[in-house]
C-alpha cells in the first residue's frame, strides 16, 4: 500500500506536530514547514502529514518484522543513512521523536497501554535508536556545528 495514500492520522493526533511544537529546532530540517508556528497549521499541513505517514510506516514495518532481525536492521540502516547523508539530521532527534510518538500512543490508547506494554515500547525505542546511530557511525557521521556569524 502506498504510504502517501494511507489514511494515517485521519482521526488521531499527529505526533510530528507535537514534536515540532515542543522541539522547534527540529523544523530547521524541513524547508516546507520550517516557517509554521501554529500547531493547527502543522496538523493540517499535507507535507507534514505525508512525512508523518512515512515515519509511522517505517515504525510499522519494524514492529511487523520484530521476528526478523535482519529486516529490522535493514530498514533502520536505510532510515539512518538517509537522515545522516541526505538530510543531515542530528541523530538525537530520533530519540526525541520516538519519545513523542510514545507519549501520543500512551494518551490515545491509555486503556490499552499497561506498564508491560509501555516497557516493550521503551525497549523498541532503544532498539531503533541504537540501529539508527549505528548507521550514522557506519557512514562516518560527524556532528553538525551550526554556522556562526563572525
Image (cartoon, grey):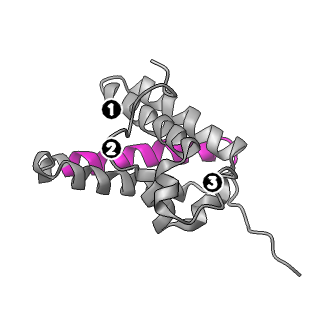
Gap between marks 3 and 2 measured at Cα: 29 Å
Q: Residue beneath label 1, please?
A: 63
Crowd around label 2: few <14 · some 14–19 · many ≥20 (10 Å): some
Residue 96 appears in the rendering: no
- Whether pointer 2 and pointer 1 mark residues with C-beta atoms closer than 8 Å, the reply is yes
Q: Earlier in the sequence, mark 3 or mark 1?
A: 3
- Quarter containing the C terminus: bottom right
Gap between marks 2 and 1 measured at Cα: 8 Å
Q: Residue at x 55, y 41 (%)?
A: 46
Q: Nearer the viewer, residue 70 or 145?
A: 145
Classify 124 as above or below 150.
above
Q: Residue beneath label 2, please?
A: 124
Q: Nearer the viewer, residue 150 or 55?
A: 55
Q: Residue beneath label 3, please?
A: 33
The quadrant where residue 138 appears: top right
Q: Earlier in the sequence, mark 2 or mark 1?
A: 1
Classify 53 as above or below 32.
above
Where is residue 114 shown, x and y percent of the image?
11, 50
Left or right: 21 as drawn, with respect to 33:
left
Crowd around label 1: few <14 · some 14–19 · many ≥20 (10 Å): some
Amino acid at each position: 500500500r502506498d504510504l502517501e495514500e494511507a489514511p494515517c492520522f485521519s482521526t488521531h493526533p499527529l505526533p510530528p506536530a507535537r514534536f515540532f511544537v515542543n522541539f522547534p529546532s527540529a523544523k530547521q530540517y524541513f524547508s516546507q514547514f520550517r516557517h509554521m508556528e501554529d500547531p493547527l497549521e502543522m496538523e493540517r499541513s499535507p507535507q507534514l502529514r505525508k512525512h508523518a505517514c512515512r515515519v509511522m510506516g517505517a515504525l510499522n514495518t519494524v514492529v511487523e518484522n520484530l521476528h526478523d532481525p535482519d529486516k529490522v536492521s535493514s530498514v533502520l540502516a536505510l532510515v539512518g543513512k538517509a537522515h545522516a547523508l541526505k538530510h543531515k539530521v542530528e541523530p538525537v532527534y530520533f530519540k526525541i521523536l520516538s519519545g513523542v510518538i510514545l507519549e501520543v500512543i500512551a494518551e490515545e490508547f491509555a486503556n490499552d497501554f499497561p506498564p508491560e506494554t509501555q516497557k516493550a515500547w521503551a525497549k523498541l525505542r532503544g532498539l531503533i535508536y541504537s540501529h539508527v546511530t549505528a548507521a550514522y557511525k557506519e557512514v562516518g557521521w560527524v556532528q553538525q556545528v551550526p554556522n556562526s556569524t563572525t
